Image (tube, rainbow, N blue to C red):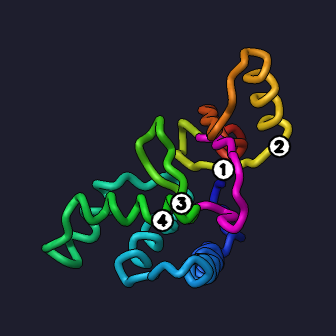
Amino acid sequence: MAVTSSHNHQSCIKHAFERADAICLGKGARFTPLRKRILELVWNNHKPAKAYDLLDILHKEDKSAKPMTVYRTLEFLQTLGLVHKIDSLNAYVGCTHPEQNHSCQFLICGQCGDVKESCDMGVFEAVKASAGIHHFKVERQMIEVHGVCMHCLDKA
């Protein structure tokens, strides 16, 4: 999602935290200060965050921060559906609707780096149907589409 001047990003972060609190409470999981901080760093903007970039920021705040701590925290957040891993970038983005169990497509701008989460059920059903023709059962589906966002196209 391209962040425009009219976009209230603090509202995104606030909304993400409200949902994370509710999801953790509902699942009996602890939303510790470290988990909150890493979720905040992932939501810092709409660009994917790499684990080692998060570690660099955390290390400035706490010299004892370790890579495994960041990876375990990201795994926790991913398990609860609060973040998605963009495999092709080896990076993470905040989930825009973690309350729903969903398969998504990620539209990744190669120029500005923004990522837009799209959950088009038509795409999901098309992949599922194609897999069925080949006698293949889809268990998880995540599609990453690389291209150029409209914001960057307009600037060109």
Instruction: Establish if 144 lies above or below 42.
Output: above
Between the residue at mark 1 and the residue at mark 4, the CA separation in whole angstroms equals 19 Å
Q: Nearer the viewer, mark 1 or mark 2?
A: 2
Of label 2 and label 4, which has the lower sequence position? 4
Label 4 neighbour load within 10 Å: few <14, some 14-19, many 20+: many
Between the residue at mark 1 and the residue at mark 2, the CA separation in whole angstroms equals 16 Å
Q: Is residue 125 left or right of residue 36?
A: right
Amino acid carrying mark 4 in the image? Leu
Label 1 neighbour load within 10 Å: few <14, some 14-19, many 20+: many
Q: Is residue 135 left or right of residue 87?
A: right
Between the residue at mark 3 and the residue at mark 1, the CA separation in whole angstroms equals 13 Å
Q: Nearer the viewer, mark 1 or mark 4?
A: 4
Residue 53 position in % (x across, y down) = 31, 57
Amino acid carrying mark 3 in the image? Val
Amino acid carrying mark 2 in the image? Met
Of label 4 and label 3, which has the lower sequence position? 4
Between the residue at mark 3 and the residue at mark 2, the CA separation in whole angstroms equals 20 Å
Which residues make up the magenta segment?
95-108
Judging from the image, what secondary structure is the residue with disc 3 in? strand
**Label pair 4/3, CB-CB below 8 angstroms:** yes
Task: Please name whichever residue, 96 or 139, is drawn nearer the observer in this view of the structure.
Answer: 139
Label 2 neighbour load within 10 Å: few <14, some 14-19, many 20+: few
Badge 4 is on which residue?
Answer: 77
Residue 116: assigned label: 1
Asked if the magenta segment contains residue 100, the reply would be yes
Asked if the magenta segment contains residue 57, the reply would be no
Judging from the image, what secondary structure is the residue with disc 4 in? helix
Name the quadrant containing residue 89.
Answer: top left
Judging from the image, what secondary structure is the residue with disc 2 in? helix
Badge 3 is on which residue?
Answer: 83
Task: Please name whichever residue, 83 or 154, is drawn nearer the observer in this view of the structure.
Answer: 83
Task: Please name whichever residue, 109 or 93, is drawn nearer the observer in this view of the structure.
Answer: 93
